[in-house]
Image (tube, rainbow, N blue to C red):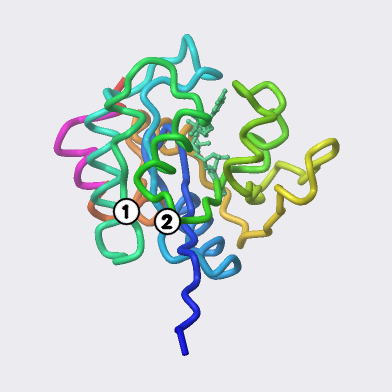
Amino acid sequence: MDAITRRPSIGIMGGTFDPIHHGHLVAASEAMNVFNLDQVIFVPAAMQPFKAGRRVTPAEHRYLMTVIATASNPRFDVSRVDIDRGGWTYTIDTLTDIGRQYPDADLFFITGADALAQIAEWKDSDRLFEMAHFIGVTRPGHVLRATGLPSRSVSLLEVPAMAISSTDCRDRVRRGKPVWYLVPDGVVQYIAKYRLYQM
Ligand SMILES: Nc1ncnc2c1ncn2[C@@H]1O[C@H](COP(=O)(O)OP(=O)(O)OP(=O)(O)O)[C@@H](O)[C@H]1O
Ligand SMILES: O=C(O)c1ccc[n+]([C@@H]2O[C@H](COP(=O)([O-])O)[C@@H](O)[C@H]2O)c1
């Protein structure tokens, strides 16, 4: 009798990751557990269209911090697709590129509830839901509302509350305050080594 093979389930977490912090890692870990994902791929953005005008750390630093943060988990991976494509990072392109690399996989895009609430404004938003299942994770201070989203393609997931944001981490470094335990140890050391977020 043929063995029944399950399609691989791959989580994708796109973000600016300036820097990556434990909120991102806990959200990915919880999504992996609840949705039985085989792998979560973190995809640092080149230029996030809704963050135009913001000063963002060069992509190679954000990529390397994401590699350092995820290195200890054999089921976490980092992809350069958005950085190497360059320009504005649209999730439709992220899903197309990752989908080409894993043609037999079911894709799950993990995103914060705040981002999910704006998804109707994302490029080709109607096609996004055909390409992946969307997991909207809670963030402290953001109420989960998914009105108008296709319920078959969107799930909401409560993750243990972690009031951490990259904005707060950057502000703390700038003010000389510690970011130990908000970001992984290697990321603390990377920020110090390259003197990121000093001004
Ligand atoms: N503490 C958190 N808990 C759960 N999800 C989070 C958390 N922080 C960020 N996210 C989600 O992770 C994804 C990537 O986040 P991003 O890289 O923009 O970090 P951020 O902390 O929101 O950054 P910034 O403060 O610079 O806007 C987004 O979908 C965001 O909603
Ligand atoms: O596709 C779009 O139009 C689009 C608009 C805004 C944000 N996104 C994606 O949402 C993800 C989370 O972004 P961020 O900056 O909140 O970490 C990241 O992968 C972005 O590229 C995508």
28 w.r.t. 93: above or below: below
Q: Nearer the viewer, residue 37 or 182?
A: 37
Q: Judge the density around disc 1: few (<14), some (14-19), many (≥20) Cα neighbours within 10 Å.
A: some
Q: Nearer the viewer, residue 168 or 160?
A: 160
For image coordinates 14% across by 38% down, the residue present is 193
- Main secondary structure found in the magenta portion: helix
**Magenta residues, start to end:** 188-196
Q: Nearer the viewer, residue 13 or 167?
A: 13
For image coordinates 37% across by 31% down, the residue present is 175
* Label 1 beta carbon less than 8 Å to ligand 2: no
For image coordinates 25% across by 58% down, the residue present is 71
Rendering quarter of residue 115: top right
Q: How many marks?
A: 2
Residue 48: percent from the left, percent from the top?
47, 22
Tell whether 32 sits left or right of 174: right
23 w.r.t. 6: above or below: above
Q: Judge the density around disc 2: few (<14), some (14-19), many (≥20) Cα neighbours within 10 Å.
A: many
Q: Amino acid at mark 1?
A: Asp
State the mark number for residue 190.
none
Where disc 2 sits, the SS reads: strand
| Residue denoted by label 2 | 40
Outermost bottom residue = 1
| Residue denoted by label 1 | 77
* Label 2 beta carbon less than 8 Å to ligand 1: no
82 w.r.t. 139: above or below: above
Residue 162: percent from the left, percent from the top?
56, 54
Residue 154: percent from the left, percent from the top?
71, 48
Q: Are marks 1 and 2 in contact (CB under 8 Å)?
A: yes
Q: Quadrant of the C terminus?
A: top left
**Residue 166 belongs to magenta span:** no
Residue 186: percent from the left, percent from the top?
23, 52
